Image (tube, rainbow, N blue to C red):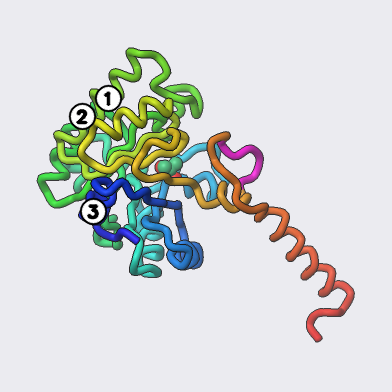
């Protein structure tokens, strides 16, 4: 497992792939640690998979701080990354620093910031003040109402060139990791090769240094359609429903408790 950022840098140099999964509570965090994941993302996707919202925009900094604290307290080996939620950082670098300080004090080792070129100044401000930053580009779910849905990004040559330029600027500003969501595989692989920092992909093909998925997608718990790039490793929804139905039946017919 790779708890430190220097271990991530080393893994990139050695060409070792790293695995990251989202976690929002201590039970899932412990199970993921036992499974050997390299990093846990306390993602603002919690608004969707835990809160049942259509997007991540309602997630608050208080909620992120609470979930980061319970995840970070539960594990000792994986790197813990926390999302800056919508509305907690965009106004100014100083506002972003105050939000990051709360997440780092809650136990995060690195904070994820959504946005490309517009976040360069903020990333530089944070990096100069001891905040390790993972920049998140491509499909940035906090912009979903502006871009009109969860749409793949970087599809035209111009958009791809812009993403590469943004990635370079974010690295120059001090970003330690780069997460790329829902962009073409070739572009993600090119950015990974050209950048000195480790990259993490979701829906960005096999060419990134690490992969992240949302826990509920992996376990088959996501209601409705999970994103097409997410792989379901078990049918958790059926397993849980059957187990709970057995419990209900046993209570009703008096088999439980004995
Ligand atoms: O919030 C989240 O889970 C994320 C992933 C989709 C990368 O940002």
Q: For the view shown, which residue lies furthest in the bottom direction?
A: 258
Q: Please state the horizontal and vertical placement of residue 101, each as a whole percent of the image.
A: 22, 54
- Which residue, given by chain and number where applicable, does mark 3 sit on? 5
Q: Please state the horizontal and vertical placement of residue 152, each as a whole percent of the image.
A: 46, 25
Q: Are marks 3 and 2 in contact (CB under 8 Å)?
A: no
Q: Sequence order check: which comes first, mark 3 or mark 2?
A: 3
Between residues 183 and 137, which one lies in front from this camera angle? 183
- Which residue, given by chain and number where applicable, does mark 1 sit on? 164
Q: Magenta segment range?
A: 222-227
User: SS class of the residue under badge 3?
Assistant: helix
Distance Cα–Cα, label 2 vs label 1: 6 Å
- Seen in the image, is 213 located left or right of residue 250? left
Is residue 181 visible to us here? yes
Q: For the view shown, which residue lies furthest in the left direction?
A: 128
Within 10 Å of disc 1 (Cα), the crowding (few <14, some 14-19, many 20+) is: many
Vertical side of 119 occupied by 104: above or below: below
- Which residue, given by chain and number where applicable, does mark 2 sit on? 168
């Amino acid at each position: 497992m790779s708890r430190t950022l220097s271990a991530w840098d080393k893994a990139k140099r050695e060409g070792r792939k790293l695995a990251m999964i989202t976690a929002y509570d201590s039970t899932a965090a412990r199970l993921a640690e036992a499974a050997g994941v390299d990093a846990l993302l306390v993602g603002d996707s919690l608004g969707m998979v835990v809160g049942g919202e259509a997007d991540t925009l309602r997630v608050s900094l208080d909620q992120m701080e609470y979930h980061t604290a319970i995840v970070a307290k539960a594990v000792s080996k994986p790197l813990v990354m926390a999302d800056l939620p919508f509305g907690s950082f965009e106004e100014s670098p100083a506002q972003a620093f105050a939000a990051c300080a709360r997440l780092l004090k809650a136990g995060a080792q690195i904070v994820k910031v959504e946005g490309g070129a517009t976040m360069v100044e903020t990333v530089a401000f944070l990096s100069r003040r001891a905040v390790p930053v993972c920049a998140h580009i491509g499909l940035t779910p906090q912009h979903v109402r502006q871009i009109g849905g969860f749409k793949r990004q970087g599809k035209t040559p111009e958009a791809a060139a812009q993403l590469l330029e943004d990635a370079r600027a974010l690295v120059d500003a001090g970003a330690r990791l780069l997460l790329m969501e829902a962009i073409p595989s070739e572009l993600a692989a090119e950015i990974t090769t050209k950048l000195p920092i480790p990259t993490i992909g979701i829906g960005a093909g096999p060419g990134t240094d690490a992969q992240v998925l949302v826990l509920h997608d992996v376990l088959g718990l996501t209601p409705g359609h999970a994103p097409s790039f997410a792989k379901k490793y078990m049918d958790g929804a059926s397993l849980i429903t059957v187990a709970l139905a057995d419990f209900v039946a046993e209570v009703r017919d008096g088999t439980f408790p004995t």
